[in-house]
Amino acid sequence: MKLFFPALANNPRVAYIATALFAVALIILPLVVGTAGNAWVRMLDFALLYIMLALGLNIVVGYAGLLDLGYVAFYAVGAYMYALLSSPHLYENFEWIRMTFPDGLHSSIWMIVPLGAGLAASFGVLLGYPVLRLRGDYLAIVTLGFGEIVRIFLNNLNSPYNITNGPQGITNIDPISIAGVPLSKPLEIFGFTLESVQLYYYLFLILAVVVIIVSIRLQHSRIGRAWMAIREDEVAAKAMGINVRNLKLLAFAMGASFGGVSGAMFAAFQGFVSPESFILMESIIIVSMVVLGGMGHIPGVILGAIMLYAIPEVLRYAAKPAQEAIFGYEFVPPEALRMLLFGMAMVLIMLYRPKGLWPAPQHGVKTRAGAPATPAAPDAGTAKAA
């Protein structure tokens, strides 16, 4: 339990109680929100998807210090993988697939999740290997180009062989089924009827918890500490014997795998994918979630993901009625207001909270009342580990 509440690590009983209460709150949240309409539960679903995306990018940007502006490409890879393996598109366009799979392609979630993670990780290594020697702005430009290349390929792979159906996208994607129960239909349990958006919420919540646990384990592992050493000073890390090349590739692969799983869930949830869902702005928003919340700090990244997704979506519903009540008419369109507030938030954060709204705690610093902070002397265990 101390993984979720590190401040309570010395009090396991309180940590267990806090975890149980928090879990109960997350379980009943869609039931309470659902009373206001399924649209609000749908917002919770997408918030969980963005949490997984932000945590995946946090491995690359927050832990390893590699600025990646093409992260949405891995999101797209996972989405199109699920779309192609769980829709009639390939079955209708390729004779050999029709002969091999006479009943069509219908993939299960137990195959989709590991396959999506593995395929996206492969693309992560494919991106990471050519840019091993790049840093800063140069790395950002190359990764930005990689994201655009993937989107353009998806937009044009409809001839001479129709693989992605081009800008029209892929439709009729199978919903996820667990134990023969499709999540696209309401399910009655103990007299309660759970809508499709609520069922997807619980699935995304389980995946998000797994991603959080993996991220925490990585952060406190030798690999995570090596990533942070590379982030702080790559030359010093290399001098200490850290294999910088392999660890950078591992960071790209691990971060991309979370994006691939999120993309597969997005395709299953939407039932439709097209290249327009994976534009550059999506990558910028995901990077902003990590920066706004606090790079390298898991609770901060989660907070940033929720704020940058949920607040604009709330404005979509509340901005027009509020303006009509104040001015008598719609003064600023909701989309323009959304981007205005988004830009203002990022400017203010960079000016007044450059480390994010919830930055990572500083380790190795001791303070006394009335005295300035001074670095703490390393103990024997820390010196030995270094």
Image: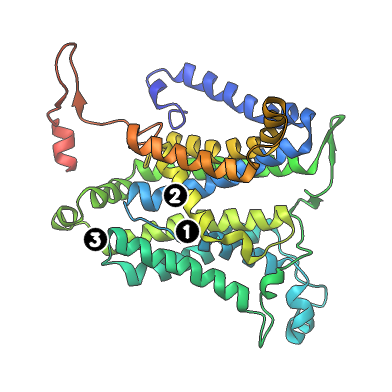
Residue assigned mark 1: 71
**Residue under the point 74% across and 81% down:** 97
User: Which is in the foreground here, disc 1 or disc 3?
Assistant: 1
The secondary element bearing badge 2 is classed as helix
For marks 1 and 2, the one nearer the N-term is: 1
Q: Are marks 1 and 2 in contact (CB under 8 Å)?
A: yes
Residue assigned mark 3: 243
Task: Give percent across and percent down for residue 225.
Answer: 28, 45
Asked whether, in this view, residue 181 is left or right of residue 304, the answer is right
The dot on residue 287 is 2
Q: Are marks 3 and 2 in contact (CB under 8 Å)?
A: no
Cα distance between the residues tagged 1 and 3: 24 Å
Task: Give percent across and percent down for residue 193.
Answer: 85, 34
Nearest the eye: 26 or 357: 357
Q: Say above or below: 354 vs 97.
A: above
The secondary element bearing badge 3 is classed as loop
**Residue under the point 32% across and 68% down:** 131
**Mark 2, other Cα within 10 Å: few <14 / some 14–19 / many ≥20:** many
Amino acid marked by disc 3: Asn
Is residue 117 visible in the rendered structure shown here? no
**Residue under the point 70% across and 35% down:** 320
**Mark 3, other Cα within 10 Å: few <14 / some 14–19 / many ≥20:** few
